[in-house]
Amino acid sequence: VVVSHGALTNFLAGTQRTLRLTAADRLAAVTTIAFDIAALELFLPLTTGARVVLATRDHVADPQAMLDLVGQAGVTVMQATPALWQMLVLHDADRLAGLRVLTGGEALPRPLAEKLCAHAAQVINLYGPTETTIWSTLADVSASRPPSIGTPIANTRALILDAALRPVPPGVGADLWLAGDGLARGYHQQPGMTATRFVANPFGPPGTRMYRTGDLARWSETGEIEFLGRADF
């Protein structure tokens, strides 16, 4: 996937509007560099004056070691998949106190969301494919309702369309498309695949495109996006 510097810059600026990191923050980098979400852990702190706390594979594999690092290094923000958060919650949820939790890469189960909300300072659920530059939507999770994937970040538009590319009303599940400044240029040296997944956006200015995520979603009555699963499963 070919992602421009402009798309990455838009992602960092859009995410910062919600996270509002400062020089007082310390963000744990736990993700392998082969996974695109590592870009948030490495670049967002460097663009905001915050500090990066590097975790090793041993930390990530051992919940005690990971929680020790969080406490000893004064970590204030950490991004991880629900699987890693589940491991930490089961080991000692009380040690998440004061931590701002970022979770994404997998669907966030409601029981885990409730446990995180009960112990952490804040829980933010993130969603987005690599083709739209890491995270495209985010939600501030509350224990009082099922977790959603929220609303788009800055300069990003989410569209939920039927098979004829018509918008569907709230509560109706259909294909989730994404448009805006975060779209990748396409797939490297794969013009056919690029043309299939990145198509002209009939809802935007001439020349703009939208990306079919392959996911199903629906609008909630409050205007948030509820993830329903993959369209091809």
Image: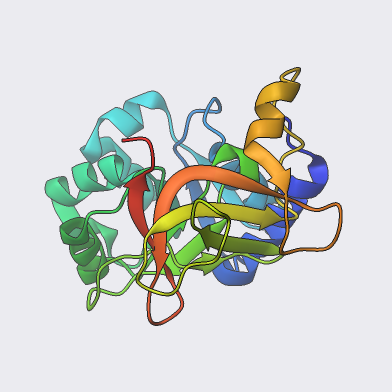
x 55%, y 28%: residue: 33
Residue at x-position 57% and y-position 53%? 177
| Residue plotted at (64% across, 52% down) | 44
Question: Residue 188 appears at what percent x and percent y?
Answer: 73, 21
Q: Left of 93 or right of it: where is 2? A: right
- The image quadrant where one finds the N terminus is top right
In the shown orientation, is residue 32 left or right of residue 189? Answer: left
Q: Is residue 209 above or below residue 123?
A: above
Residue 13 position within the rendered picture, expressed as x and y whole percent measured from the top left? 71, 61
**Residue 65 pos. (x, y %):** 28, 36
Rendered residue at 49%/56% (across/down) = 162
Query: Is residue 102 something that shows in the picture?
Result: no
Nearer-the-camera pick, 166 or 129: 166
Residue 156: which quarter of the image?
bottom right
Residue that protrudes farthest toward the front in the picture: 164
- Which residue is the extreme one toward the top? 189
Total numbered badges shown on the rendered structure? 0
Q: Is residue 201 left or right of residue 215?
A: right
- The color scheme shown is rainbow
> 9 or 156: which is nearer to us?
156
On the image, which quarter does residue 170 sit in?
Answer: bottom left
33 w.r.t. 21: above or below: above
**Image quadrant where one finds the C terminus:** top left
Q: Which residue is the extreme one toward the right?
A: 206
Residue 184's x, y, as percent?
A: 72, 40
- The answer to whether any part of residue 230 appears in the image is yes
